[in-house]
Amino acid sequence: MTVKGKTILVTGAGGGMGKATVELLLENGANVVGCDLNTDSLAPFVGQENFMAYKGNLLDEETVEKAFKTSSERFGSIDGLVNIAGIAQPATPINEVSLQEFHKIMDINLTMTFLTCREAARYMKGNKSGKIVNVGSVSATRPRPGLQAYVASKGAVETFTKALALELAPFHINVNILHPGPADTTMLGQFAAAGAKVEDTKKEIFEKSVPLGRLIQPNDIANSIKFLLSEEANMITGTILHVDGGRNI
Ligand SMILES: NC(=O)c1ccc[n+]([C@@H]2O[C@H](COP(=O)([O-])OP(=O)(O)OC[C@H]3O[C@@H](n4cnc5c(N)ncnc54)[C@H](O)[C@@H]3O)[C@@H](O)[C@H]2O)c1
């Protein structure tokens, strides 16, 4: 499985899954652009010839355009896009969810994916090749109560991914979605209801929901993303890859 020499833009690169993905892709010889609102955690990679950190809000059209332009100028092409950036929703009864909160979650999880995929397609269509991996959530196929906006945003990203896979297939661009299960990152605790008791937010509660018996580690996600970016996945498009220890069953 090789990504050597490929230029791959990773969003949410400063977060748990993002950083692990950046690290694995760099180790495997890819040129990596790590984009995030906060790029502090990417400091260990700064200075490597094949790495560039790009700090900015990817909900802003101009920021997205500039991120791709800067990456293409620095490394010569855009071969892959990995959309990991996202936000959680604290479990909330629907009658207490504000319109503002609903819009915020849809914007960051769905609209941002649209913006980065649109920009990637502009580059990849010209090259007649490319790989896009969107990160959804197992909650798109197996929702938990109280996460209406979050699960709707991830379900929409799944359908968007399939539609884009079909549209971009004539250009040899693969578009897939990876649904993580409960993962061992700071985001996990953010799904807890406001005022939840400490014992309700413990990792063991989430672990018990995973048939394989442990939380998903950032490296589990990174390994599967690397596969979907590689030539071994050339005939895989429009597919959902659950990396969830069986949680979707
Ligand atoms: N952690 C879990 O249990 C879990 C489970 C299923 C799916 N997911 C999904 O996996 C992805 C990564 O999750 P994680 O656990 O690594 O979370 P994380 O919070 O560690 O990382 C998310 C990153 O996205 C960045 N981001 C958010 N809004 C942004 C914006 N407007 N512009 C640029 N960057 C922005 C954040 O700064 C953060 O670094 C998310 O899409 C999440 O919904 C997570």
Image (cartoon, helix red, strand yellow):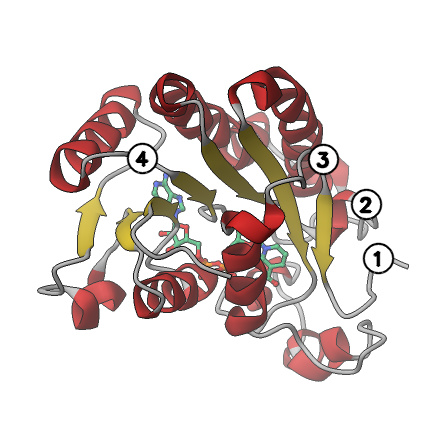
User: Of callouts 4 and 1, which one flags the residue occurring earlier in the amino acid sequence?
Assistant: 4
Question: What is the CA distance from the residue labelled 1 to the residue labelled 2?
Answer: 7 Å
Contact between labelled residues 4 and 3, with CB atoms less than 8 Å apart: no
Instruction: Kindly report which numbered mark, 4 or 1, lies closer to the viewer in this rendering.
Output: 4
Q: Disc 4 marks which residue?
A: 78
User: Of callouts 3 and 2, which one flags the residue occurring earlier in the amino acid sequence?
Assistant: 2
User: Of callouts 4 and 2, which one flags the residue occurring earlier in the amino acid sequence?
Assistant: 4
User: Of callouts 1 and 2, which one flags the residue occurring earlier in the amino acid sequence?
Assistant: 2
Q: Is mark 2 within 8 Å of ligand 1?
A: no
Q: Disc 3 marks which residue?
A: 155
Contact between labelled residues 2 and 1, with CB atoms less than 8 Å apart: yes
Residue 12 location (% of width, % of height): 39, 50
**Placement of 73 over or under 6, stated as above or below:** above
Residue 246 location (% of width, % of height): 83, 66
- Residue in front for this viewpoint, 213 or 28: 28
Residue ID at (34%, 68%): 23
- Quarter containing the C terminus: bottom right
Residue ID at (74%, 35%): 95
**Placement of 225 over or under 63, stated as above or below:** below
Question: What is the CA distance from the residue labelled 3 to the residue labelled 4?
Answer: 27 Å
Instruction: Kindly report which numbered mark, 3 or 4, lies closer to the viewer in this rendering.
Output: 4
Which element type, helix, strand or loop, lies under badge 1?
Answer: loop
Q: Disc 2 marks which residue?
A: 141
User: Of callouts 3 and 4, which one flags the residue occurring earlier in the amino acid sequence?
Assistant: 4
Residue type at tag 3 = Gly
Residue type at tag 2 = Thr
